[in-house]
């Protein structure tokens, strides 16, 4: 019988502890994901149950007795047609897409200028941008609304695009600056030696290399604008022609507080697109969040 050395015993212990450590981490992650998804599953099940089933029992009973439940898609038909949710869905798209693209475009140019261009007052301007990160947007609502009333922009899509752009720019500039400033300096020196301008370097080098940071901010901004209610109520109002999903769903809660089959269907419609956007861009998400945090 061969005796094992202390090093071999230690190595075996490390392998065993490593296996159990990885297993415990995976089990924990699965449990957290399951608990996080639990309300969404309940919302989905409730949205496709009949009104009588919703009033008679909880959604969890369908897991044990799925064939005793009346499944229906009529809730979605009622919400999208009779309650104006489809028009609100289109309005949310009209608001969210430009309100995401405009600040990303402006912030990318500004972040490049702060990172690689030298001009008077650069440090002061960047300090102002960082300082704006801690200013609550609620402080700007009244002055902006007064200015909008004077310009006749209240209740217009242009007004809310500009509002969301202003509220989102400080974070966008800061996030993109952290990434763009860490790009290899040799790339830019080589490009400038070959006769490239700053605009060419921005288009040919910075934009292709900054996709993770751009996608990360796109997720943040799109989810923020899509789920926003306060800014939409202040600058758009609740008129059916311009009301977005969150405002329409808020009215649905007030007027149909007992129609849970319609409320759950409307809530699930509201979360479908943000969920799709996150799943489509999630591979860039972590890379974008860690952008510029570590040098090496």
Image: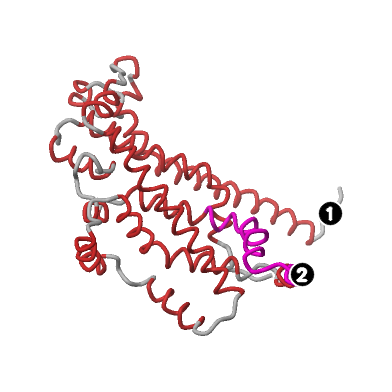
Q: Is residue 125 left or right of residue 144?
A: right
Residue 71 rendering spot, x and y as whole percentages: 31, 18
Q: Residue at x 65, y 53 (%)?
A: 18
Checking the image for residue 124, the label placed there is none
In the image, is residue 166 above or below residue 86? Answer: below
Residue 153 rendering spot, x and y as whole percentages: 25, 56
Is residue 214 highlighted in magenta? yes
Q: Residue at x 46, y 39 (%)?
A: 276
Q: Is residue 178 left or right of residue 145?
A: right
The residue where tag 2 is placed is 190
Q: Is residue 147 left or right of residue 28?
A: left
Quarter of the image for the C terminus: give it: bottom right
The front one of 210 and 36 is 210
Q: Secondary structure at mark 1?
A: loop
The front one of 270 and 55 is 270
* Bounds of the magenta segment: 190-215
First reached walking from the N terminus: tag 2 or tag 1: 1
Q: Secondary structure at mark 2?
A: helix
């Amino acid at each position: 019988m061969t005796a094992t050395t202390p090093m071999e015993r230690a190595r075996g212990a490390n392998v065993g502890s490593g296996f159990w450590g990885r297993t415990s981490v995976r089990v924990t992650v699965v449990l957290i994901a399951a608990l996080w998804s639990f309300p969404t599953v309940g919302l989905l099940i409730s949205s496709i149950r009949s009104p009588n089933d919703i009033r008679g029992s909880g959604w969890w009973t369908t897991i044990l007795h799925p064939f005793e439940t009346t499944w229906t898609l009529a809730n979605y038909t009622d919400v999208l047609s009779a309650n104006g949710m489809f028009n609100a869905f289109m309005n949310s798209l009209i608001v969210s897409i430009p309100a995401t693209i405009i600040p990303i475009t402006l912030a990318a140019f500004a972040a490049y200028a702060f990172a690689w261009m030298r001009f008077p007052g650069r440090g002061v301007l960047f300090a102002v941008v960082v300082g704006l990160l801690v200013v609550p947007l609620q402080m700007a609502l009244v002055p902006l609304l007064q200015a909008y009333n004077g310009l006749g922009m209240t209740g217009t899509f242009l007004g809310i695009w500009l509002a969301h752009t202003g509220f989102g720019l400080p974070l966008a500039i800061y996030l993109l600056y952290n990434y763009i400033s860490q790009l290899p300096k040799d790339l830019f020196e080589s490009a400038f030696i070959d006769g490239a301008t700053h605009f060419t370097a921005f288009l040919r080098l910075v934009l292709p290399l900054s996709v993770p940071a751009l996608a990360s901010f796109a997720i943040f901004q799109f989810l923020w604008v899509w789920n926003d209610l306060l800014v939409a109520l202040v600058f758009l109002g609740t008129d059916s022609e311009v009301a977005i999903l969150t405002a329409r769903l808020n009215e649905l809660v007030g007027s149909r507080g007992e129609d849970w089959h319609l409320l759950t269907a409307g809530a699930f419609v509201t979360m479908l697109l943000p969920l799709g956007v996150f799943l489509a861009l999630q591979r860039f998400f972590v890379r974008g969040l860690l952008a510029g945090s570590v040098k090496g």
